[in-house]
Image: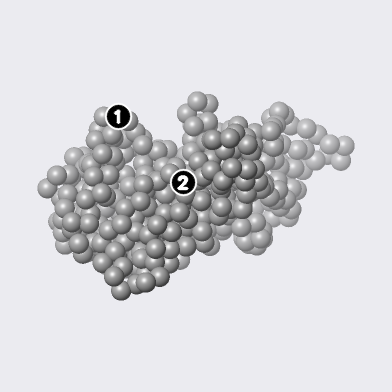
Amino acid sequence: MCETCGCTITPGNAHLVKADGKLEHTSDGTASIEVLSSLLHENDHQAAHNREHFSRHGVLAVNLMSSPGSGKTALLEATIEALGSEFSIAVVEGDLETENDAERIRAHGVPAVQITTGQACHLDAHMVHDALHEMDLDGVDLLFIENVGNLVCPASFDLGHHANVTLLSVTEGDDKPSKYPVMFRAADLMLLTKSDLLDVLDDFDTAKAERHLRELANPAEVFTLSARRPESLEGWLGWLREAVAAQRAGRELNPSIQPDGAALHSHG
Amino acid sequence: MHELSICQGLLRQVEKVAAENNAKTVELIRLRVGALSGVEPPLLERAFEIARAGTLAAEAELEIEEGPVVVKCQECGASSAVPVNNLVCQYCGEWRVNVTEGEELLLLSLEIET
């Protein structure tokens, strides 16, 4: 892996950080060292290791991110019910405390490892790596990583997953992408959840939510669905089927976080 | 909160580079933090004051270069500086753009005492 290039250097900003890598001594005895590496270098390194591990096992890893209470676990339960006979599914759950979500998933006959982060507001690649030691990935097609409910910090940490799915429940407000641009910019797919409540909410406009996503230069698909309405899940399930098929065919997906950096990496 | 984890990662990198260069202490750490990086420089500075204790950088100064967000339009090819939550071309209004600056989260350089 790249030790020094810095994953976030793009052709556009490279001129800002040009370095010759030499150690320059100044007259007062101090030395200046050009380093030029990503502050998330340790995490990115572990994430790349995780991604190789997933791909070696033929597993598609999907990172679910949203505010607390937007329905990540309910969506997983409905997804397991719909796809459980088609794919072998496993789940990593992230929360500050409790085993509750992992227990909900296990009740559907799917293996789940709970990560309790204590006070930490996000999962990182090392936590996911540790959780993988408790999980047998042989035969697994689809691994969901349910991140800590938080629209800020999880967006900054690559876990080694293949795609970011960001949920926005219709009870939250359609301007969330504008308020939390870093999170929604990272989305490879946006799901507008709890759509069964749209009938009683007159202040959520799904078209506006999508427009705010486009204003972040994000071309991600958007599906509106409710975990309580199985028929509304078709777009999401179709997206998952395609992604699993792509992974099996060796067309590995990469999350859209810092895509230029990732591109630079693969050619560097 | 995540500024503290990022700071701890930063200090591990700093200590590694410092040790490789036989540093007695680290005097200055230079970073570049883009507006779309998800990291707030003032929070990073406060986390740094806590995290640096007991490291080679215990007395180090943190210098953060903050960068603007710049997008390059896929349609008209123009580059424009934009607000973090409105990444559309300022010339033609197109949203299909590439972010060319603003996502950096970089350790640029160190000054050490040998």
Residue drawn 16% across the image and 53% down it: A82
In the image, what residue occupies the spot 56% across and 52% down? Answer: B86
Whether residue A96 is visible here, answered yes or no, is no
Q: Name the amino acid, label 1.
A: Gly
| A101 sits left or right of A28 in the view | left
Look at the numbered discs 1 and 2 and tell me whether their residues touch, using CB distance below 8 Å. Answer: no
Horizontal placement of B29 versus A232: left or right? Answer: right
Choose the circle earlier in sequence order: 1 or 2. Answer: 2
Residue lying at the far left of the rendered structure: A85
Mark 1–mark 2 distance (CA, rounded to whole Å): 25 Å
Q: Chain of mark 1?
A: A
Q: Residues within 10 Å of mark 1 (few under 14, many from 20)?
A: few
Horizontal arrangement in the rendering, residue A211 relative to residue B17 (left or right): left
Is residue A23 or residue A192 the one in the foreground?
Answer: A192
Q: Chain of mark 2?
A: A
Q: Amino acid at mark 2?
A: Asn
**Residue position for label 1:** A250
Vertical order, A170 against A56 (above or below): below
Total count of labels: 2
Q: Looking at the rendering, which quadrant does residue A51 occupy?
A: top left
Q: Quadrant of residue A251?
A: top left
Estimate the x, y position of residue A81 in percent, counting from the top left: 15, 56
Closest to the observer: A53 or A262? Answer: A262
Q: Which label is found at residue A218?
A: 2
Where is residue A61? Give x, y as percent: 31, 44
> Measured from the top left, where is residue A9 in percent x and y?
59, 36
Q: Residue furthest top?
A: A267
